[in-house]
Amino acid sequence: MESISVYVQNGVQSSNKLKTKEKNTESNMVASGDGEGDLWTDAMNEAEQQNRLKNVIVSGIVIRRVHQDESLMRSVEQIGRKLGIKYPLLDVQMARRIFLPDKTKGAIVIQLKSTLIKENWILKYRKGGFWRENWYMNEHLTKQNFNLFKLTKIMARNQRWNYVWTRFCRIYMRKNEGTKIYQVTSPENLYSILNIKMPKEPPKPKKLDGRRYNIMDQS
């Protein structure tokens, strides 16, 4: 299958606005005290996640460095067309590139014009099975939510729950097809859903290495 190349551009004006907005939110995530600190951190995490609600993050793609006048949006257009979208840039608000330690690969954050459009992109990615080409598209979770998602995956596998997924940046799980769906909001909530005692130190989530988020997808 055709691979996706990222065209690097140093100065996409719209991407700078997105990057600044998210950095400002992250810098405010400071908790002081016990209960009040937890509430403050949760509130800031929720605010940060709301800022990312229309975003997808695309990873596992090969970077091809070209002249500065090559547009990052050209790569976004290429991604959208692989999903079968005829005019993908009509869906896009802005985009920015994330630099990773591995200089041969990177990630792109794409902000779409609505949450419904974002869901459409995610759905087309999942139905198309594009992870088999070793590139990945997922919702843009905050660090706190992403760590909770990874923990949920670990515990689901350990307890033989078959479905874990995200939708509108919320984490969900169910044991089998047709069984009750639960929303996971915290490690304590997760252990309560699984009906097991929470240890003093929950297992540390392993790095996903860009692999597909979900055990099995629910749409």
Image (cartoon, helix red, strand yellow):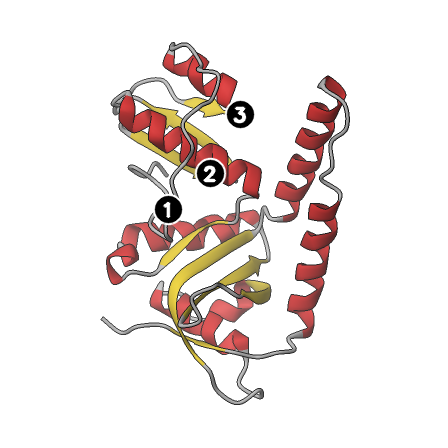
Q: Quadrant of the N terminus?
A: bottom left
**Residue type, label 2:** Arg
Residue 176 coordinates in the image, percent (x, y)? 26, 23
Residue 71 coordinates in the image, percent (x, y)? 55, 81
**Residue type, label 3:** Thr
Q: Residues within 10 Å of mark 1 (few under 14, many from 20)?
A: few
> Which circle marks residue 127 in the picture?
none
Q: Is residue 168 visible?
A: no
Q: Residues within 10 Å of mark 3 (few under 14, many from 20)?
A: some
Residue at image point 66% right, 47% down: 51
Residue 207 coordinates in the image, percent (x, y)? 39, 45
> Which circle marks residue 208 in the picture?
1
For the residues carrying marks 3 and 1, which lies nearer the camera in this image?
A: 1
| Cα–Cα span, label 1 and label 2 | 19 Å
SS of the residue under disc 1: loop
Q: Quadrant of residue 135?
A: bottom left
Q: Which residue is mark 2?
A: 167
Q: Which residue is mark 3?
A: 185
Residue at image point 25% right, 23% down: 160
For the residues carrying marks 3 and 2, which lies nearer the camera in this image?
A: 3
Q: Eyeballing the image, is 184 above or below 144?
A: above
Q: Earlier in the sequence, mark 3 or mark 1?
A: 3
Q: Earlier in the sequence, mark 3 or mark 2?
A: 2
Residue 24 coordinates in the image, percent (x, y)? 74, 52
Residue at image point 60% right, 48% down: 52
**Residue type, label 1:** Leu
Residue at image point 26% right, 54% down: 129
